[in-house]
Amino acid sequence: MKFKNHLLSSILIAVLTLSACGGSKTEPDDTSSGLDSILQLESSLLTNQGVDLILYFPNDVLTNIQWSQTSGSTIDLLAVNSKVVGFTPTSSGDYSFKATFNKNGGASQTLTKSITVTNNASLITARLAHEVLSGNKVSLRAQLDTNIDSSLIQWQQVDGPTVSLTESDPNGHLAIFFDAPQVSKDTYISFEASVTDQGTKHTDTVTVLVEPANTINASAYFDTRVAKVFPYNENSPYKDNLTNCVYSNTLTSSCTLSKLPLIAEEVQNSSNTPSVDTIMDRVVVSHQWMGDRFKEFLINNDPNNDIKNLLRATTAIVISYDVRPSFYWAATGAIYLDADNFWLTAQERDTINEAPDFRADFGNDLKFVMPWRYVKENQYASSYIPATVRTNRAAIIGLYKLTSLMYHELAHANDFFPSTEWYIHSSQTRILDAALSSDFESDQLSISLPLQSQTMRNLAQVSFAGESANSTQKAYLPADIEGFFSPDIANDFYAYSSLREDYAMLFEELMMQKRFDVFRDVAITNQPTGDNISATDYIVTWGQRGRIGEESLKPRVLFSASRVLPEFDSVAALNTVPEPIAMTVGDDWIENLTISPANAQRSEKKGLKLEPQPIFNRYYQKALPKH
């Protein structure tokens, strides 16, 4: 079993049998005591036990929902506009909540709910109750007392239409995944997580409210169910078009620039930087906290205005719990960001869907991998916090990961919409048509300074696009790959996946090095097999830190950077880029962390946790629609 695919390759599929209390009903009975009320399914509550409150009106349309807490120790409610709020009280006592809403377009109504949390602590917590649409992907996670073996956990569906569960196995059955069933009205489905310790069974129940959704049109731009989102700024001048133009299953044709123009239109001059408020008018979120964190990022971590300036080539920013992986899409002109880049509290992380990346199995048949990472002063630039550890994190922990992502994806935006073309399109032109009419600078890069290795291009389609490897490709050893890659002029394996990605990779690496003194490592290693594989099992055949310092690559870096962000002095930056540092052949991936000459120390010494495995896939190029 391969370490990098451990989660997916150890998945267990199980159609669960409902317990007697849940029966096998397909939807809740309208005569239940919870109808038209705030529903709480658990009769008693302990501290550290998940609480689910559901605004349950299956026969009505609710709008303008707003939850608030009216008494008790402060609870951080992160889905205040949803029909469902889930949270975990850490102290006993009485709590009260209020929900206001409009029913069927009528006058505002208010319901209240009080709960009592006892002083006993639960040894198991199931999270997080929330609202989804039919067809949405759902993930739920259990947390156990540290003294209990996680492999003992059991999940059982106890209410609602039967679903097929996928369980994660590497650390016990701590997380489950499923697709929300099709329903004709609001329907709740509940799951019990349990563990038996020293003869005593401990349980917690978590509930998901499934809302009906129309069948997705065959020509829809988003052909799998996307989450419900809303404009971060309710007073945005684009609020009426924003969501429908960038993240909706009803979108079947690209919107016109009159409905959703580039942010550059707001500044009217290609040398002006848009304000944070201007940018936030274009933000779409599934949870308000996601927009809050993005705004903080722009205010606190963009001192040179790089990100704000790069955003001029976009129409919107979408941050949602179900975006994974992040991407830029010319069909809408928007950038889509995985909310995992933004959480600072454990409660915020609870709201994010953690379904595995669909590309995790790509390239399994090859005998090599090409891992990469960002490092600063011989340490990982970002710290890794596993999902099994529920903790808060400081913004600096994920800052460089987020910043490099933004540089990369916004390089794509400025390839499709370069500054020379921001003001030439008619307002009645569709966003997609305007994007495709561009004189792509990435195309020009491939003509003027092309990559040479077709072998690497073909292998990239296996590793990043999911094509099947042929017998020749399966036989290549790491030493063979060194012969293909090292003499060529790409800075990363992923650059071979497309002309667009090649262009973006060059810009990203330069900006991270010159703005933050963060260097990029790339290597060629074996692909270990078997169980319990760690990062130390990846043995380096070839590798470099700061590959853009190669003289043969510098003209390509300058070509990209000077066009993506003209305000940045890329000539001066390249004059100070140091020569690459070679990795030590035969040492493993971790041993090669401390190859820079100054401040050499292992990252553990400053409390940073090493990535459990090298990084292979991160970026994603979503195919454009054909219409």
Image (cartoon, grey):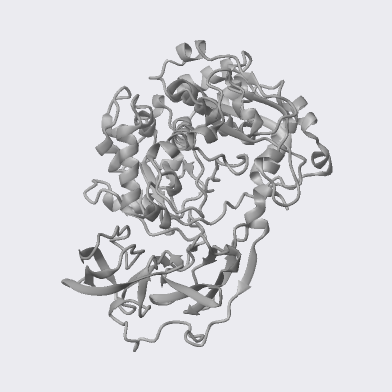
- In this view, the residue in front, 56 or 536, is 536
Q: Quadrant of residue 446?
A: top right
Residue 618 in the image: above or below residue 8: above
Residue at horizontal 39%, vertical 65%?
48
Q: Describe residue 127's horizontal placement relative to residue 547 as left or right.
A: left
Which picture quadrant has residue 50?
bottom left
Q: Is residue 523 shown above or below 571? A: below
Query: 559 and 65: which one is in front?
Result: 65
Query: Taking 518 as reference, is 583 left or right?
Result: right
Instruction: State the residue in front, 495 or 447.
Output: 495
| Numbered marks: total | 0
> Residue 600, percent across and down?
56, 23
In percent of width and height, residue 419 lies at 39, 26
Q: Is residue 345 visible?
A: yes
Q: Residue at 48% x, 82% y: name it.
A: 26
The spot of residue 526 in percent (x, y) is 75, 37
